[in-house]
Image: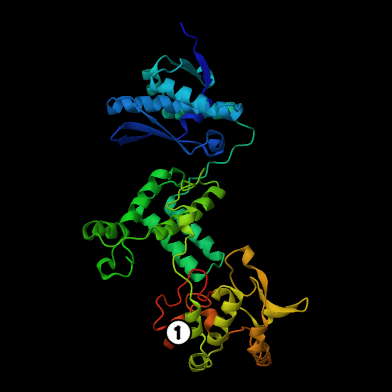
Amino acid sequence: MPKHETVPLGIVSGIVSMAKALLLDRPSGTFARFLVPQDLRASVGRRYLVRRLPPSDRDRSRLIGACMRYALGKAFLKLRKDPVSDPKKLIDDVLKAAQEGRVQEYIIQGPNGFMLKVDDAADHARAMEALPVILESLAPASASTNASPAQSAPAKPAPMLHASIALFLTQFAEKNPAAATLLETRHSVELFRDLTRDKPLAEVGVEECDAFRAALSLWPARARVLPDYKGLTPRAIIAKAKKLKPPGLNVRTKEKHLDRLRVFFNWAVQRRWMSTNPLTGVRLQSKAQKYAPKRRGFTRDELKRLFDPALRREHCLTEPSKFWLPLLAIYTGARLRELAQLRVVDVRQIANVWGIDITADAGSLKNAASQRFVPLPDAIFNAGLLDYVQALTERSFDRLFPDGSWDAKNGPGDRTSGRALLPGAIATIEHRTRIKRHRFGL
């Protein structure tokens, strides 16, 4: 008679706590998918383990999946305690044995003499189903055995998804992001909330994210402003889009929605409300696709038209920002937002070099590397920049462009578009001034 392995109840509980097998029905058969714990993904070399199940009915497939889950959980415990030279072989061996219905006989041992003997796969499946009830019934005995003199604090209730999203958005807004960033983040995260049933945050996983991706594939472009969808809930919008089949979101927009949702999940992981981020590694585009140029820059002939002296006298001299921002952008390569929020004191001399000091003191920056000192060429000073700065200083202005560009509705620089700056010059320019980094480039 084979020897039964004795397994402590706590270890079995840890094994069973891993995610259940997700059964996938495909034309080639039924497959079981398992999520690899985050701390073992580097050694295992993947995020999921997928194995084809033998042809059988649904109940038999669930039974085999339960056996594979238990065997895989034991393999993960072994990898944590004693990393082997070939973890792939270990996992393949235990999954193959479980697929064939071979489960090593074992005895679950708990407090107060509790024992549960498992002889075959059917026993194992029944034990796994009964284990949550067993654990609950044995909890008082286990607690009294391991209790310390001081009474333990009651467990805090698990945070719910919708309440967690509300708290995240509140704390995100406290970071004072750009208005557009806050608006877009709120839209993406609340869209996920509205399309996902409220549940404990720890239970949100890849299935909910897959459902969100499927919803994005149906979501109409500009759904919030089109009359056909005005006043509808997100679920109603998707239902109507299935019938109307309107133009959908482009892949970059979908990627941005996932990026913003990824920020929320990272926040939840940092608070230890989630063990892993279910969107880790999920990308709709390669880096090459993501950063491929979407719009061309201006040609030299177009720049000559944009900076024609006669047109600039006609359209730029009444508002300082319309005169200086294009010049600073084309000579420095800085973002219009960075330039539009500059203060008078940010035009300064360092080590006998005149330039603009771009810092977070003037306003929000894209990232830490955006804080920098940018030297200015003689052409800018020949145009009279220092005289302009002196005039602002004498009139006690704080901002370099006090005419409103720095506090525009959608952030600094929003009012400085090519159409607003030089309408006569760009009427025949194919792409106006919408380029990726900033609106003026060689």
Number of numbered discs = 1
Q: Nearer the viewer, residue 15 or 82?
A: 82
Against 325, residue 202 (above or below) is above
Question: Residue tagged by mark 1?
Answer: 420
Q: Residue furthest front?
A: 301
For the point 48% across and 66% down, the residue is 182
Q: Is residue 349 left or right of residue 298?
A: right
Q: Nearer the viewer, residue 28 or 298?
A: 298
Q: Nearer the viewer, residue 42 or 182?
A: 42
Crowding near pointer 1: few (<14 within 10 Å), some, many (20+)? few
Residue 409 % position (x, y)? 47, 78
For the point 38% across and 19% down, the residue is 101
For the point 37% across and 51% down, the residue is 213
**Element under disc 1:** helix
Image colouring: rainbow
Q: Nearer the viewer, residue 144 or 75?
A: 75
Visible in this render: residue 138? no
Residue 196 % position (x, y)? 37, 51
Against 390, residue 284 (above or below) is above
Q: Residue furthest top?
A: 1
Q: Amino acid at mark 1?
A: Ala
Residue 437 % position (x, y)? 52, 69
Visible in this render: residue 328? yes
Residue 402 % position (x, y)? 57, 86
Quarter location, residue 137:
top left
Q: Residue furthest right?
A: 351
Q: In the picture, which quadrant includes the C terminus?
A: bottom right
Against 3, residue 158 (above or below) is below
